[in-house]
Image: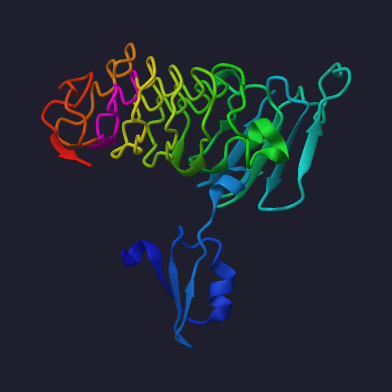
Amino acid sequence: MEKKEYLKIFNNQSDYDSQKDLIMDTPHVVLLDDTQKVIYAPKIDYSKEYFTIEALENGTITIPIFSGASYVAYSKNDEQWVEKVKPTEPSEPLLVNDIYADIQISVKANDKVKLKSDALALTYYEQIEISMPFNLEGNIFSLLKGDDFINPGLTKYYDGAFFQFFMGSKVVSAKNLILPSMKGPSFYEGLFSGCKSLTSAPQLLATTLQNRCYYNMFSNCTSLTTAPQLPATTLAERCYQGMFYGCSNLNYIKMLATDISASDCLDGWVNGVASIGTFVKNAAMTSLPSGINGIPSGWTVENA
């Protein structure tokens, strides 16, 4: 256990109560010095939490028009939801309560803003503008399914429903962001492309992949050192193409595929990663090539 990340000592219960929402990521352990009481934080199931933006500095969150959405709602620091409903006829000029007008939310460091809507697709063209560094957590499907996001299933959405949605943004950590399995090509294509501050990627738990699903997903994320585990054993057409292109500090990948026969599934996927690193592969996989289309040259290879 790393004390600097998980262990915190407070003088008493009152001190803890005043700071417990800000202190650290779970799991953590707290010691109350006066009574020697130990408190273990509960593990949070982020798949059951609304999509959330956590501000790391003071700034502004600007929510644009979402494709096909009848409403957009937000809640800052668990306060009452504020809902903007699409009017029957748009106002001329645009009014702040119209869904056609951008929603601007002023935030301070450590503020958390939850979002929900019934958008049809959210791409680079509907990107949320976030002026300051931020973290992401919760289930991204609350942006498509509103309150019914917990069990979205493999619903068919528009191809590329989250195409380049965070591209070039100041996101720092997305480790608690939930990306449910998708049905349809290009679903998360380019999602974090060019996010140079990203240090922690979300888990990618899908074992059945779609064409181009993670194409260029983390390209040019130059602060990323560890790739999310890739558990799928059968790859799909262009699913990992360019996935880690230009990730110059990336030095650890665990990829468990045994069938890489799909067209261009690994094309240039590790072009430009660190010159030294560790690649963990499926022990049953014996045909991964070396180089930018397989295992990075110069890396140590281990079997899972």
Vertical side of 20 occupied by 233: above or below: above
Residue at (68, 33) in percent of width and height? 145
Q: Is residue 115 visible?
A: yes
Q: Is residue 74 magenta?
A: no
116 and 101: which is toward the camera: 116
Q: Is residue 254 magenta?
A: yes
Residue 77: % across, % down: 66, 52
Q: Is residue 58 visible?
A: no
Q: Quadrant of the N terminus?
A: bottom left
Vertical side of 268 occupied by 304: above or below: below
Give the residues drawn in magenta, as a range: 241-259
Residue at (23, 42) in percent of width and height? 304
| Identity of the residue furthest to the right in this view | 88
Vertical side of 123 occupied by 52: above or below: below
Question: Residue 115's quadrant in the figure?
Answer: top right
Question: Residue 70's quadrant in the figure?
Answer: top right
| Identity of the residue furthest to the bottom in this view | 35
Task: Tally the marks.
Answer: 0
255 and 260: which is toward the camera: 260
Residue 269: % across, % down: 29, 21
161 and 263: which is toward the camera: 263
Q: Is residue 94 left or right of residue 113?
A: right
| Identity of the residue furthest to the front in this view | 284
Residue 76: % across, % down: 68, 48
| Identity of the residue furthest to the left in this view | 298
Residue at (49, 18) in percent of width and height? 186
Instruction: State whether the magenta stretch is mostly helix, strand or loop.
Output: loop
How was the colour assigned to the protein in this rendering?
A: rainbow
Residue 292: % across, % down: 21, 19
